Amino acid sequence: MSVKEIFDTMDYGTAPESAAEALAWLVDGGDRFGLFIGGKMTDPGAVFEAKNPATGEVLAHLTQATEADVEAAVTAARKAQSKWAKDSKARAKVLYALARLVQKHARLFAVLETLDNGKPIRESRDIDVALVARHFYYHAGMAQLMDEELPGREALGVCGQIIPWNFPLLMLAWKVAPAIAMGNTVVLKPAEYTSLTALLFAQICQEAGVPKGVVNIVTGDGAVGEMIVTHPGLDKIAFTGSTTVGRRIREATAGSGKSLTLELGGKSPYIVFEDADIDSAIEGLVDAIFFNQGQVCCAGSRLLVQEGIAEDFHARLVARMGNLRIGNPLDKSIDVGAIVDPVQLQRIESLVAKGGAEGTVHQPVKAPEGCFYPPTLVSGLEPSSLLMQEEIFGPVLVSTTFRTPAEAVQVANNTRYGLAASVWTENVNLALDIAPKLVAGVVWVNGSNMFDAAAGFGGVRESGFGREGGWEGLMAYTKPAGKATLVKPAKAHMKPDDVEVLGLDRTAKLYIGGKQARPDGGYSQAIYSPKGKLLGHSSIASRKDIRNAVEAAQGAKGWAKATAHNRAQVLYFIGENLSARADEFATRIRDLTGTTEAKAQAEVAEAIDTLFTYAAWCDKLDGAAKPVPMRGVALAMNEPVGVIGAFCDDRPLAGLIEVIAPAIAMGNRVIAVASEAYPLAATDFYQVLDTSDVPAGVVNILTGSHAELAKTMAGHMDVEAVWSFSSAEISAVIEKESAGNLKRTWVNNGLSRTYPARDWLAQATEVKTIWVPYGE
Ligand code: NAI
């Protein structure tokens, strides 16, 4: 037999990993597992089955947690929190011990994960578990550095964490490591399909000396998730999973005062230009969409390939897909394992059945019997096709073509999601021109599905908000130290019996698109001083005015591209022009609020100082180059959020400037709704804006009822974020209505606290992580 013949006929040999150790661990656990609460495993309660999706075998029985269990877990976490938060260096040691123990038990973790989830052992061994250890190491370091590098920040308290089934242990690590590093304690619920590695992790917590109550793990289905989400004793909810459930959680937590981060679905574009290294792009694509059977939130599931190479690219891709090995996940030679559960298999099958006919379906390898789905390409789709828009969450790649880079960007961004994107080209100019234009939290240049603890991960649009990993990830688990005070919204002064009559109509209009605009409804209200003097009238904005302001703000996109230096100049100019009229504003503030002359002057001085501060920040909020352990660098670039709606507090001028300055400094456009009781300083401010070179539409100011306007602002699909420093009721409305397009919100819940500039800047930016090849 010639070598050629051997190569032609040779089949691969199987290389199964032994499941013995993992099965023995399950037997040791007594087959029926309880919950991990207060450092101990409870007795099992009512149970459900944990199955191996590759074989259908029952692996163990798990407890469906009850309300009382969740209560006990929250109580244990609360009890442990203050002591745990005290000593960050002691925490560092515990996190380090966890990292070491994950490594020590790496094989057991990997096999258990593969048995429970169906992912190829190659992946659980080389990717999942390795990244888990890295995450604990990295955050052990963050705990070590917290006192020195994050002065003035403290833990949020007790965090509820709900994770999905696609990376069971890795998602646990992403949630637990930063939370406990920063001094929080947690109640975590793994997904009902995949809870076993979380229970093994509970055992590791005992071995590592995690104090009791710091980590609590409750198993069960979505009902247990709901119990956590609605539990009043939690300070934060962190969720990874479907957009549908994410939206429900946003609504359920609205007005509760809980912080929230959501990492949701995606439909990430994989863009291949004709000058790309095609072989690498195809290998990258195999990783992008067939890794973990495509059950990856940031899977490169939408192939956009340049027209000229499309035919050849598809042919080569289908040939490569024909070489993928699908089957027993414990076999080290397997590329594609089992789908997590028959329910998910059915979801994939029905979506492909529904949308596949719009294109051509290629399935060059057959799937074995059972819970498997073959690697699939559906080519020839339109950007609007069902399968191009819906997250399939399976090994199904859908594809369309584009002609020009501009068209590639347009098609790539034609999605309600914004999690990740890959760009393939050998032209560095093209890659780095495209990367900032993609609406996504993560961009891989000539790569795909790269992750590291040092690099932020998370999305925009309906892919959720918040980042996990890196320094930016810590924002989600810390807050500025110090007590908040209750906000008492000011009441407008009442009309006295004998009003001083003024000859002139002094109705202040709204400020939309750089012009003074009459309110759509035509209504206004009289504004009186505390002594009953009529100071003027302010317009009452309505829903239509919000829509007009959003349109104007959306039309001012150029501001995001203005250089930081240019933005700084504009902010300095506003500050300068405000200074020139300081006395006039001080008088206005005194008339509106009845405060002393000195206090009114102090407020104007504060507003000017705020403008100068954010003018200074414009070109100083540096990005970062993260030292990721790969042949590359992960850039953290600060991008503007987009259009921000903001409800101001009752400091007539300082409350307005406080929201405008950081928002526009970072390249956002803003729609500020002035203090409801004292709107007239904001309306005087129009003239300052008019003389300060602020492009039309960058700053829009409305006056009127916050309650009337909050719902429309938060529900508007073209507003990217809403802030509120108004009353608790307004916070609740905003959080609830924001569920529509899952916009970011930053609300005070009726509590006032002073935020350092860094917090404002973080709220005014999205960190985009751009992975670029670099070095050897
Ligand atoms: P899911 O979003 O329902 O499950 C994720 C987690 O949320 C699980 O722990 C679940 O028990 C919990 N959960 C479910 N309902 C809840 C509720 N009302 N309140 C609180 N927690 C709740 O995801 P599912 O149903 O397993 O998968 C459905 C689809 O979601 C998939 O086909 C896929 O498209 C998407 N998905 C996306 C993920 C991502 O990482 N982006 C992960 C998992 C699923």
Image: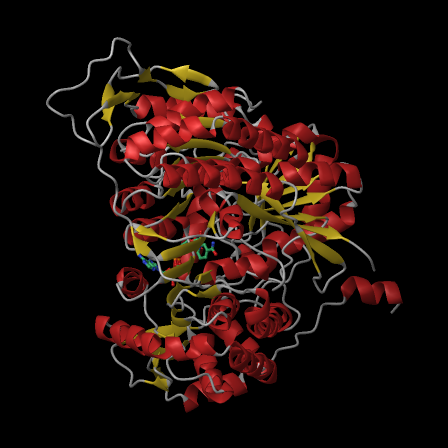
User: Where does the image place residue 84, in percent across and percent down from the top left?
Assistant: 43, 78
When asked about the image quadrant of residue 470, the answer is bottom right
In the rendered view, tell whether residue 205 sits above or below residue 534: below
Quadrant where ligand 1 appears? bottom left
Q: Residue at x 60, y 82 (%)?
A: 100
In the rendered view, tell whether residue 145 sits above or below residue 240: below
Horizontal side, residue 47 vs residue 580: left or right: left
Outermost top residue? 503
When asked about the image quadrant of residue 40, the answer is bottom left
Quarter of the rendering occupied by the C terminus: bottom right
User: Where does the image place residue 557, in percent across and percent down from the top left?
Assistant: 56, 27
Q: Residue at x 65, y 58 (%)?
A: 450
Horizontal side, residue 592 vs residue 325: left or right: left
Could you say which is closer to the camera, residue 631 or residue 541?
541
In the rendered view, tell whether residue 414 sits above or below residue 253: above
Could you say which is closer to the camera, residue 543 or residue 230?
543
User: Where does the image place residue 372, in percent across and percent down from the top left?
Assistant: 50, 61
User: Where does the image place residue 437, in percent across and percent down from the top left?
Assistant: 63, 36
Quarter of the rendering occupied by the N terminus: bottom right
Could you say which is closer to the camera, residue 462 or residue 5?
462
In the rendered view, tell whether residue 561 sits above or below residue 302: above
Outermost right residue? 2
